Image (cartoon, grey):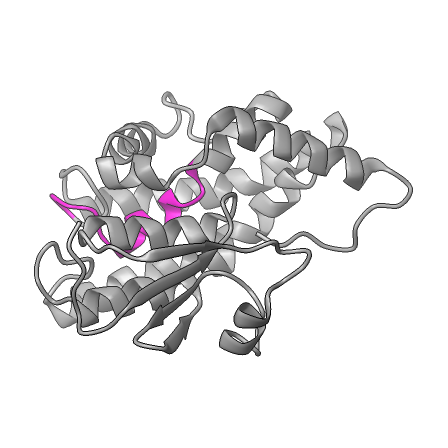
Amino acid sequence: MAAGGGGELQLLGCWYSPYAIRARVALGLKGLSYEYIEEDLFSKSDLLLRSNPVHRKVPVLIHGGRPVCESLVVVQYVDDAWAAPPHLLPADAHARATARFWAAYIDDKFFQPWRALFRSTTDEQRAEAFKDVLPQVEVLEQAFMECSQGKAFFGGNAIGLVDIALGGFLAWFKAVDQVSGTCLLDEARFPGLAAWAERFMGVDAVRDAMPDDRRLLEHYRGFLAKLASPAAPAGYSS
């Protein structure tokens, strides 16, 4: 892949972070080469702390020595800095605003109930959390139908900002479903999203950014075991 944009590129990430996956998908779709630096989120590097002193999280894209923080900001920066196709946001101002709205919805409204499912350690907790997250998935199913206008992706014929925002979680959806016995993007209930997820995961730049399923499942089970223990961690960075 050819680098571009007038500066060296580095990406600070973590292999299991859905937010870092977003950045990797965006860079891959644009065909950009970059140095990937794996971060230990429980022992963060000085470079990460200097580059993102406010949130201290991944991903951080460093372009020509200047950091760009927060995954959705990184995706939009990549689209702005490398203006050649493929475009991750539409040219039309209203369509761009709509894409930003739904990307924000995923982080602000969908993530919290899904996080409760992600952190559930008992069957009772999982059943309650799954029930709570389904209305958010119903909203996203309708959003997909409206945004895609019968095409393959939220972005139409090509992957866009909303696809990347939701798609970064797909590997995690699978891991949580396997442990919980759920099916978040059930084909019968959410046919649009189920078909979208299959198409999204079939794109080379997406596959290249995704963690290994078995490794992620092992990591998730280990996290749940720690969470259920008396010395459970106070939080979980992803």
- Residue 172 in view in this figure: yes
Is residue 137 shown left or right of residue 77?
right
Is residue 131 shown left or right of residue 163?
right
Q: Which residue is drawn at 15% across and 45% down?
A: 158
Q: Residue at x 39, y 38 (%)?
A: 210
- Residue 183 in view in this figure: no
Q: Where is residue 177 in the image (x, y as percent from the top left)?
A: 55, 26
Q: Which residue is drawn at 18% across and 60% down?
A: 3
Query: In this view of the protein, which residue sits in the foreground, 231 or 46?
Result: 46
Q: For residue 169: magenta?
A: yes
Q: Residue at x 23, y 35 (%)?
A: 204
Q: Where is residue 216 in the image (x, y as percent from the top left)?
A: 55, 32
Quarter of the image for residue 9 reads bottom left
Q: Where is residue 97 in the image (x, y as percent from the top left)?
A: 25, 68
Is residue 231 shown left or right of residue 212?
right
Q: Where is residue 221 in the image (x, y as percent from the top left)?
A: 68, 30
Q: For residue 162: magenta?
A: yes
Quarter of the image for residue 169 reads top left
Extent of the magenta region: 156-170
The total of numbered circles placed on residues is 0
